[in-house]
Image (cartoon, helix red, strand yellow):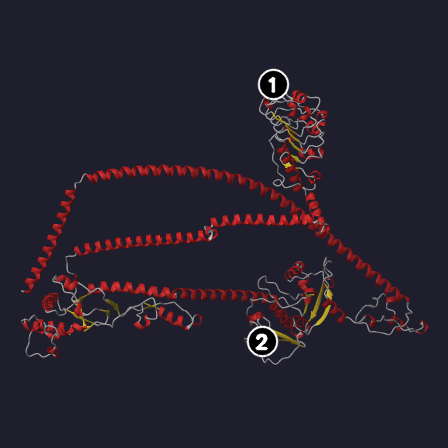
Amino acid sequence: MSLTLEKLKALCNTDNLKSVQSLKLEGLELTSCFKILLREMGVTLFILSLKNNALSTIEIPLGFTNLRKLDLSTNLLTNIGSNDLWSTMPRLQILYLHDNLLESWDTFTNISYIPRLAHLTLFNNPCIHLPQYRKFMLSTIPTLLALDFHIATQEERLGIHTPDPELSKVWIQDLPDMKSFKSHMYKLRRKWEKCSPIIKIQSHWRRYYAKKNIGGNMLSERDKHAIKIQKHIRGWLLRLHLRKDLEKMLRESKNDHLLYTPAQFIRYQAIHKIENAYSRYRIVKRFRKKRYDAATKISAAWKRFRVSRYNLPILKTQKFYVLKSQQRTLICMLRAMAMYSPDFYHPANSILDRMAPEFFEKIPKKPNGYTFPELFNRISECKTIKVVRFPDVENLAYSHIPLLQVMKWVKNAKILNSNNEKPIKNLSIPKKYCNDEDYLRLKKFRIRGKIMTQNERKKFKNIQLNLDEYLDLVEFVAPSLDFLQELFLMILEYNRLVFSKDLPIFQPIFKISLDRVKAACTVQACWKGYKVRKNNMLGRLAIERRAVLCLQRWWKSIRFILRMKFLVKLKKILTEYTSPIVYIQAHLFQYLVAMVSNFSFLEQNFSFYCTGDTVYICNLSRKRFLPDWVGSNCTIENSGSYSVSEEEKTLQAIILSGAKVEVVTLQNEISDRPPIADSHIKFIKLEYKSIEEVKRRASILYLKTLNYRTGSYVPLFTRKMLTHPFLMSKLRQIWKLRNIDYSDNCPAIDILSRALNPKEENIRIPTLPIVPENLMSPILLESLSPVSKGENPIDFTSENTEVITSRQIVNQEILRQRVKYTRDETYRRQAELKYAKQMDLETRVSVYKEDKEHTVGILTYRKSVEEKELELKRSFIEAQNKKKRNSINEKNFIMQFAQAKNMIGKLMKHSEIERHKARTASEVKNRVNEVKIRSKERRELVQAILYEKFKKRAL
């Protein structure tokens, strides 16, 4: 399909085609359009978009001279025209050729004739798979700022630096207007400047140069006022931005009330108080309802239990209890039921009841086989149960029902066991961890369930108890159940009589009632004890003290393990000293100070000093300095009478005292070994009197310089240690831990070497006496000239040579030997220096190779990590999409399930209502009345049967 003039005017919506600057012809399936566009629009066209058409070639002799942007993407182009065509477009800056069929090298060469091309796209073309595609394009088109999706910097053209793909990414601009074109070009240049390190350095330098050379004095008043206004505006914008962030943060944290005005805040507080009051009301109401429901359930269960009990649990045991105040009434009843014997006398025969003595006088005497002393001896004082609270006997209520008389119990009674103290074991709380008051509380806390007196309870303000004095109980064990039944009948008759006279009744207390009241009292006591412990936090205090003891034991065990570890290490070090000659490195001697640390074990807490050849240990808190198995015996000063200078208390004095000192180099001491690179390192050679002296000084040096975190210390080296292949690595590690630069000079070592060696002006060259040769005897000549006979030359540099006054030297042979010795010594030193330099160079080369290999490995590893990261991102996105789909399916399923459930519930509820409606109200009412009548008849029948049974037995 070709483009016609009428269609072009319709697309432009105007007849004056010369006024159109931007034209968009996309998706029209055009095969040719360039000639008509060049004829009708030509120079006036600035932006042209021919995207998504069927163009295969560009067949025009001339180009658009004012065209800025040309979009030919998504076409069928196999040829983009000649060089003359592109050279006639001098102002073209953006050219889109992606998604075409360009595959030859002519594509690159023809495009290079565009003089101002800034952005070019060729992706999704066969030509991009040619080798060195991007590198060739960047080198061919020097004005190019971006190729495809990434910025092209000058450093990338030169192969110096490749920008980050994420930072250098650009986007394709599709809008065909001048505004979008200008914004795209601006963003392109800004992105190019940000990705180029050279541009960044230039901008920083210009900013610095401008700030340095253009001061505040060179600005005009107008500029100063403008800068001030800009500062205020920036500050206002920043505060506005911060306020928005603050409001957002407060809303997210639900503290937006802090932004309210005073009136809004008062209203907010009122609303908050009303909400709190209403929520508390709802909580209390809910709690009361739950408590009411629970009480209703308990009472219903209790009523069912009482209705179902038709047996008499009081008749299953022959024991019951009586208050001590009613013991006289019990004695009178037993005397009335005992076998009568007028001749038998008992001291309790004279006891009469205080309330109704006439009742016992009217009872006929019937022998039942039990004597009064036998029954009286069955009365004993109860020692297992204490009645803490009991109301007045006169206030006890009377019941005409027999079972209620013997089974009831008063409400406010309180009963405790007298032997309920249980000590708590395995609880050790030392007194030093708490004050006196807490310690007394903890003593009481040791015994669970201890009874507290009234005075002790008053100490706790939250507990207020008004307890009466203790009431004692009397225990009676009946000889048989029949006797107990007769006694109960007598108690019933006695209570009926005294109630008619408005006197207090007799109340027996049975074991089942005691157990119930005792259980309630135990629950109350445990609850009150819990409140006491909670308010005083005694339990928490005990837990804290136990935790403190556990931490202390743990810390002591750690200190002991570290101490034994370092002592074993010291023993191993001392076994290596087999000679009285040791060495210490010069830099370690220069910076030798004791290690200061908050952590130290027992053997490190000591002081020391030296006097002459002896080293003393002082200020010890124990008798021994080190255990015997370590193998270091030191002299201990316990008198405290010593006065030495501060210099004699240093580690340098400990090392130098009592030793022959000499400053040597490492190569001189291991001359039998091959030369090493660090042979110039100086050591101090120390020769002591014995090996024990070496061990003493090594022990002190080890303990005072030991760092328990790293395990490092300052060692004394033996000659065997100096020949070790990893000596330098060990020294470098010690230097690094002590922040020592081994390239620095040691002033202390220089002073020590000058003190050890004599002065240069005192060294004299030994000469021979001037004696004529004809006067010399053969023996004298032999003694004066040993060189002539092949013997060793005289060592004129030896320190043991005697100092002789200078004289003239006659023998020329001696002079030649001296010159030869000096020359050989110089050659030897030069060879050693050359070898050391060569070794140093080789080590540097090897280190550089290792670093290079390491860098290459890091780069490859980084690429692999980036690829894995991209894969993980893709898999993560897929997993998220899958998770979203699953969640949507689950929500739909839940909604469908809820709808089905509600529908089924409604159907079931409707059917239930219909089923209940079938029953008439009269049927339900009749059923209830029948149940009530039946239960009433059963209750009356049971009471009648029991009454007749007791009445027959009484008769």
- Where is residue 780? Give x, y as percent: 89, 73
Query: In front: mark 2 or mark 1?
Result: 1
Residue linked to disc 2: 619
Q: How many marks?
A: 2
Rendered-image quadrant of the N terminus: top right
In the image, 398 versus 368, the foreground residue is 398
The residue drawn where x is 55% and y is 48% is 240
Q: Earlier in the sequence, mark 2 or mark 1?
A: 1
- Where is residue 772? Give x, y as percent: 94, 73
- Give the alpha-carbon distance from disc 2 to disc 1, as whole Å: 115 Å
* Residue 899 in the image: above or below residue 513: above
The kind of secondary structure element at disc 1 is helix
Q: Amino acid at mark 1?
A: Glu
- The part of the image, by quadrant, that contains residue 954 is bottom left
* Residue 655 in the image: above or below residue 174: below
- Where is residue 295? Give x, y as percent: 25, 55
Residue linked to disc 1: 6
The residue drawn where x is 29% and y is 37% is 904
* Disc sitting over residue 792 in the figure: none
